[in-house]
Image (cartoon, rainbow, N blue to C red):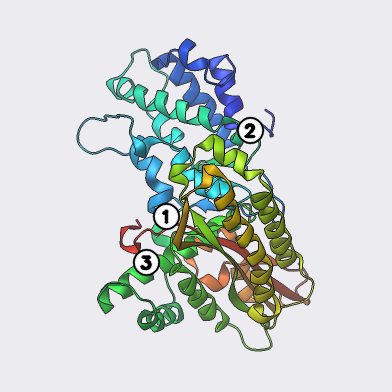
């Protein structure tokens, strides 16, 4: 089995025709066809690895525990009551929630609802009611994939299944006492219309979700980047890193754990733009230059040989100034291009950021390194253990573990609704 296949290749293999608009008129989505599809999709994801990306590319994963990332799963897979029913609606469309990310990032990844939907199709002498009820959902989801087939083929859009991350429980990501204290200290600074007790509960919940995202990124060798649905998540992320720094003494911290905003960009209302226009606009000078500049900035962040003593003054400030020119060109494009007329959302911003930090001077055989390296139990540990480690095997030599992450903030979802 070729490692360079995409889910589109699987569809074409099962359906026996090119996966484009023509197949919808020729191929009936019946139970036998869908059972073959279930088997092939299962085999594909059991052997799937997220494609590598350039160190400077931004590929946010629309985290499945946030409302945005869970939208398709809720529509196609989850159901209430005794019987599953599906009817196409705006919530079942893939392109609306992908379009903003296609403008501002090099790629995008999300949880594929298809494996969950196909889980009900198993080899059997008899067709079941469970299967027949789900055929309309399967047919509609395949039609949605036709719309983005070329983006998937070029690995701009990367659907993933839970097998990529391995089995784990959301409840495994707890907060240490230091992390709880940091979150508590943030409560007065964030302007959210909640009681102090509600804010404490909501922000602690968000902090656990951020830790889970960090762990998922580590599980994929940082082939996916962090996604936050609103800007208030950023100081919570910073608070987690501040708590992490307290685990080590000043001699062990080679580079302070820090979060920096690298870009603040004009946000466009992509509901007014078709997916075909989005693909075309991606190649416009303003957005093409933006992605090129962003790639250079993130690549320098990842590959910097020296350590940051102050991420803000040594890197983030200059990055924002560099990206400001891109922001101006995007704004000008909205005035010059009819397709983008009246799409500028003045109150919203797209935030791109990075996180850095490293610890060193730890012996490779020390308890700290044993914890850092034990991937199997990573989900049960506080944030200071969720770093990308590079250490030597010699018990007598010093080791160093570092953290480098990109993140994207896009959207205005109420944190109370994130689940």
Cα distance, mark 1 to mark 3?
Answer: 15 Å
Sequence-wise, which precedes: disc 1 or disc 3? 1
Sequence-wise, which precedes: disc 1 or disc 2? 2
| Residue at 60% over, 56% down | 332
Task: Say whether residue 344 is visible.
Answer: yes
Of residues 53 and 364, the one nearer the viewer is 53
Q: Secondary structure at mark 3?
A: helix
- The residue where tag 3 is placed is 205
Q: Quadrant of the C terminus?
A: bottom left
In the rendered image, residue 180, in percent from the top left (x then y), is placed at 40, 78
Of residues 364 and 291, the one nearer the viewer is 291
- The residue where tag 1 is placed is 169
Label disc, if present, on residue 153 of the rendered structure: 2
- Tell me the mark number nearer the camera, choosing from 3 and 2: 2
* Residue 70 sits above or below residue 149 on the image: below
Q: Secondary structure at mark 2?
A: helix
Label disc, if present, on residue 322 of the rendered structure: none
Q: Quadrant of the N terminus?
A: top right
CA neighbours of label 3 inside 10 A, class few (<14), some (14 to 19), many (20+) = some
């Amino acid at each position: 089995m070729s490692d360079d296949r995409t889910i589109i290749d699987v569809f074409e293999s099962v359906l026996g025709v090119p996966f484009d608009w023509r197949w919808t008129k020729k191929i009936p989505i019946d139970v036998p066809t869908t059972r073959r599809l279930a088997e092939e999709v299962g085999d594909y994801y059991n052997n799937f690895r997220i494609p590598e990306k350039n160190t400077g590319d931004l590929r946010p994963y629309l985290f499945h525990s946030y409302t945005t990332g869970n939208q398709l799963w809720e529509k196609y897979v989850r159901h209430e009551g005794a019987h599953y029913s599906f009817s196409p609606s705006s919530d079942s469309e893939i392109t609306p929630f992908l379009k903003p990310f296609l403008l501002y990032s090099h790629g995008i990844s999300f949880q594929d609802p298809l494996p969950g939907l196909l889980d009900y199709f198993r080899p059997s002498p008899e067709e079941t009611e469970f299967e027949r009820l789900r055929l309309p959902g399967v047919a509609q989801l395949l039609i949605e994939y036709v719309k983005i087939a070329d983006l998937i083929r070029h690995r701009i859009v990367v659907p993933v299944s839970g097998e990529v991350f391995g089995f784990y429980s959301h409840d495994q990501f707890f907060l240490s006492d230091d992390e709880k204290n940091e979150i508590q200290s943030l409560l007065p600074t964030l302007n959210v219309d909640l009681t102090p007790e509600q804010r404490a509960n909501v922000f602690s919940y968000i902090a656990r979700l951020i830790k889970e995202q960090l762990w998922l990124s580590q599980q994929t060798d940082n082939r996916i980047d962090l996604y936050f649905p609103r800007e208030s998540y950023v100081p919570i992320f910073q608070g987690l890193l501040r708590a992490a720094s307290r685990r080590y003494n000043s001699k062990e911290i080679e580079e302070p754990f820090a979060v920096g905003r690298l870009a603040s960009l004009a946000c466009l209302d992509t509901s007014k733009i078709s997916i075909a226009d989005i693909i075309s606009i991606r190649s416009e000078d303003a957005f093409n230059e933006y992605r090129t500049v962003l790639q250079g900035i993130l690549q320098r962040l990842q590959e910097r040989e020296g350590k940051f003593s102050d991420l803000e003054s040594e890197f983030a400030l200059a990055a924002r100034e560099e990206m400001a020119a891109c922001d101006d060109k995007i704004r000008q494009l909205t005035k010059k291009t009819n397709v983008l007329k009246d799409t500028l959302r003045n109150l919203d911003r797209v935030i791109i950021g990075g996180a850095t930090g490293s610890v060193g001077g730890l012996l490779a055989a020390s308890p700290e390194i044993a914890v850092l390296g034990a991937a199997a139990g990573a989900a049960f540990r506080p944030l200071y253990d969720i770093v990308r480690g590079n250490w030597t095997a010699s018990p007598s030599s010093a080791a160093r573990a570092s953290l480098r992450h990109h993140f994207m903030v896009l959207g205005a979802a109420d944190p109370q609704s994130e689940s």
